[in-house]
Image (cartoon, rainbow, N blue to C red):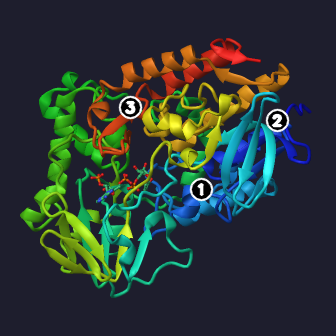
């Protein structure tokens, strides 16, 4: 084994994997299959990643059956016993435990341990990885599967720490649950997570105050029970779906080809949208009109359709107008699914605070102060989202060639090559990082199946060739970034700056758009081209 400048006495492995969620589990599986000696580190005390941490009431997947599961093993499909079309957190966490037990993966994982630093040693071409438990490991390859949505964003209100009640971020919900019965509860945040919490707790709490900054176009979820017949059909469809899903735009297969907006006669458009609405899934986002992400007229038509759906659910027209998005178009931010969310606002024990009219000024020991007064609360739930795309990687002090800090480099400018490598950081890989479909616009198990596969193939290539290092050249990275910007910026998602798809700046403005909008097929082709060319455009030493 190459020693170079690596200190004696440090454990030597072929690869370190950071994180044991959906991607980390598959990454461990692949690298072990390839014969690598690995160590994996996970901050939680078990596997599951976001599905381990996000155990808030109502936590549920918005990807519909059968698309949210692993694709690498037909056996897993044969054994899966999904119960709902949109599985809940408990079932998904159990699934990941099943996968790890089946393939005996937990023995590779050190739990309750965070990777804190990783330093590249140019002489050996290895990473020296340190943890918060004082371990140091040397590895040729370092793979971050630490998730794109795993570092919680705290609300920046003065006095938040002085609150004497219970304050909890949804992604740190206690394992034993929280007793909310009869309590005065405030929820800050009304996107995918907030919507699920709010609709789940409204009937149980004494009073619920919902603090909304930006209203969302949520689509009514149709959460059917999954029957034995459904499971049999799912198993029988594995080969077909597995062949097609990786050639889809966003990790779902739809049997109907969406028309261009202008090609559909006007009188057919609303009935057509009704039929898709009845499907009760993200099909409403990804498969209405072929040009829905590009054509403002199409987006406005869909927006108005959904606005009417929201208005129809809310008794008080003044409340309805606060809940109806008007200053941006449907689909230009993540579309949440809901199951009773809008009906909550017809309840006597629920109040909506529109933070655009009545902003939060501060938090004090007994509640929240807005411009219109003080709201007494026993519990504050922050559903305020995540330091998206870069948060988890940035928690680690990563030093690449010449001691360059990735965190410092990313402070002003994030760049990646296909979202999986960064020039100047050899042998370092990541999934769900910016500028790939997996960063935002994709059903995650499908797009990260491809990413974990590409990373594993690249590591196999480097090992077979006896390489010390592999990394994209600066030119390759610049070309990918130019392609990403050319494809993604002109889309309607690119034009909406109010979304986590665009990284925030310290001054509250926005910078890079992390969502790659070319779709999975185009992305996969680019990755395959690197691999099939023997990594032309990569520096191999
Ligand atoms: P999010 O989409 O970033 O939404 C955060 C919410 O908190 C927004 O309503 C935001 O308002 C609000 N907010 C943030 N900072 C605030 C502040 N300082 N004051 C007041 N409001 C504030 O986060 P999320 O809902 O946790 O969802 C993140 C992603 O996780 C989703 O887009 C999805 O990809 C994934 N997710 C998936 C599921 C699922 O599959 N069912 C469920 C949950 C999450 P603004 O909109 O004004 O910023």
Label 2: which residue?
34
Vertical relation: 483 (above or below) 495: above
Q: Secondary structure at mark 2?
A: loop
Question: How many dots with numbers?
Answer: 3
Image quarter where ligand 1 lies: bottom left
x then y, percent, for residue 232 = 61, 50
Q: Using the numbered discs, state the Cα–Cα distance from disc 2 to disc 3 in whole angstroms.
A: 38 Å
Outermost residue on the left side: it is 317
Q: Using the numbered discs, state the Cα–Cα distance from disc 3 to disc 1 in whole angstroms.
A: 34 Å
Q: Residue at x 62, y 52 (%)?
A: 21
Residue 74 visible within the image: no
Q: Earlier in the sequence, mark 1 or mark 2?
A: 2
Front in this rendered view, residue 266 or 310 = 310
Q: Earlier in the sequence, mark 2 or mark 3?
A: 2
Give the quarter of the image for residue 425: top right
Give the quarter of the image for residue 266: top left
Quadrant placement of the N terminus: top right
Label 1: which residue?
49
Outermost residue on the bottom side: it is 182
Front in this rendered view, residue 467 or 179 = 467
Q: Image check: 170 left or right of 2? A: left
Q: Using the numbered discs, state the Cα–Cα distance from disc 1 to disc 2 in whole angstroms.
A: 23 Å
Label 3: which residue?
256
Quadrant placement of the C terminus: top right
Q: Residues within 10 Å of mark 1 (few under 14, many from 20)?
A: many
Q: Determine whether the beta carbon of the residue marked 3 sits less than 8 angstroms from the nearest atom of ligand 1.
A: no
Front in this rendered view, residue 308 or 273 = 308
């Amino acid at each position: 084994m190459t020693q170079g400048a690596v200190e004696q006495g440090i454990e030597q492995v072929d690869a370190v994997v950071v994180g044991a969620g959906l991607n980390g589990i598959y990454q461990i599986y692949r690298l072990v299959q390839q014969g690598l000696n690995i160590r994996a580190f996970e901050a939680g005390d078990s596997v599951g990643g976001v599905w381990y941490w996000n155990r808030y009431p109502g936590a549920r997947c918005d990807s519909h059956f059968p698309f949210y599961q692993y694709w690498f093993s037909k056996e897993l499909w044969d054994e899966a016993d999904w119960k709902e079309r949109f599985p809940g957190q408990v079932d998904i966490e159990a699934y990941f435990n099943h996968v790890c037990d089946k393939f005996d993966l937990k023995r590779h994982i050190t739990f309750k341990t965070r990777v804190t630093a990783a330093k590249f040693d140019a002489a050996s071409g290895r990473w020296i990885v340190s943890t918060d438990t004082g371990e140091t490991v040397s590895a040729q390859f370092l793979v971050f599967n630490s998730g794109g949505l795993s570092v919680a964003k705290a609300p920046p209100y003065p006095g938040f720490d002085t609150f004497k009640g219970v304050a909890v971020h949804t992604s740190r919900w206690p394992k034993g649950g929280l007793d909310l019965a009869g309590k005065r509860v405030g929820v800050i945040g009304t996107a995918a997570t907030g919507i699920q919490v709010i609709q789940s707790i409204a009937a149980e709490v004494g009073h619920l105050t919902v603090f909304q900054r930006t209203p969302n176009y949520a689509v009514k979820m149709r959460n059917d029970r999954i029957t034995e017949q459904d499971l049999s059909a799912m198993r029988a469809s594995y080969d077909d779906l597995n062949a097609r899903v990786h050639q889809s735009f966003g990790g779902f297969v739809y049997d109907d080809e969406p028309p261009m907006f202008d090609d559909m006669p006007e009188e057919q458009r609303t009935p057509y949208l009704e039929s898709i609405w009845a499907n009760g899934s993200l099909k409403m986002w990804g498969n209405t009109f072929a040009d829905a992400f590009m054509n403002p007229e199409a987006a406005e038509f869909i927006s108005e359709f959904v606005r009417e759906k929201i208005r129809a659910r809310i008794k008080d027209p003044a409340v309805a107008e606060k809940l109806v998005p008007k200053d941006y178009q449907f689909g230009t931010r993540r579309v949440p699914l809901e199951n009773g969310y809008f009906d909550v606002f017809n309840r006597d024990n629920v109040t909506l605070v529109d933070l655009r009219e009545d902003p939060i000024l501060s938090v004090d020991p007994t509640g929240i102060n807005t411009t219109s007064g003080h709201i007494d609360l026993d519990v504050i739930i922050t559903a305020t989202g995540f330091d998206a795309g870069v948060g988890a990687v940035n928690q680690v002090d990563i030093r690449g060639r010449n001691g360059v800090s990735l965190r410092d480099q990313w402070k002003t400018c994030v760049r990646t090559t296909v979202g999986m490598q960064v020039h100047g950081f050899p042998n370092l890989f990541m999934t769900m990082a910016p500028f790939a479909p997996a960063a935002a616009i994709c059903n995650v198990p499908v797009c990260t199946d491809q990413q974990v596969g590409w990373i594993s193939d690249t590591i196999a290539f480097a090992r077979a060739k006896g390489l010390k290092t592999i990394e994209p050249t600066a030119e390759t990275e610049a070309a990918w970034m130019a392609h990403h910007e050319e494809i993604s910026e002109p889309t309607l998602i690119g034009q909406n700056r109010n979304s986590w798809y665009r990284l925030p700046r310290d001054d509250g403005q926005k910078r890079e758009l992390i969502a790659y909008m070319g779709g999975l097929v185009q992305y996969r082709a680019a990755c395959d081209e690197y691999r099939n060319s023997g990594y032309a455009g990569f520096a191999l030493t």
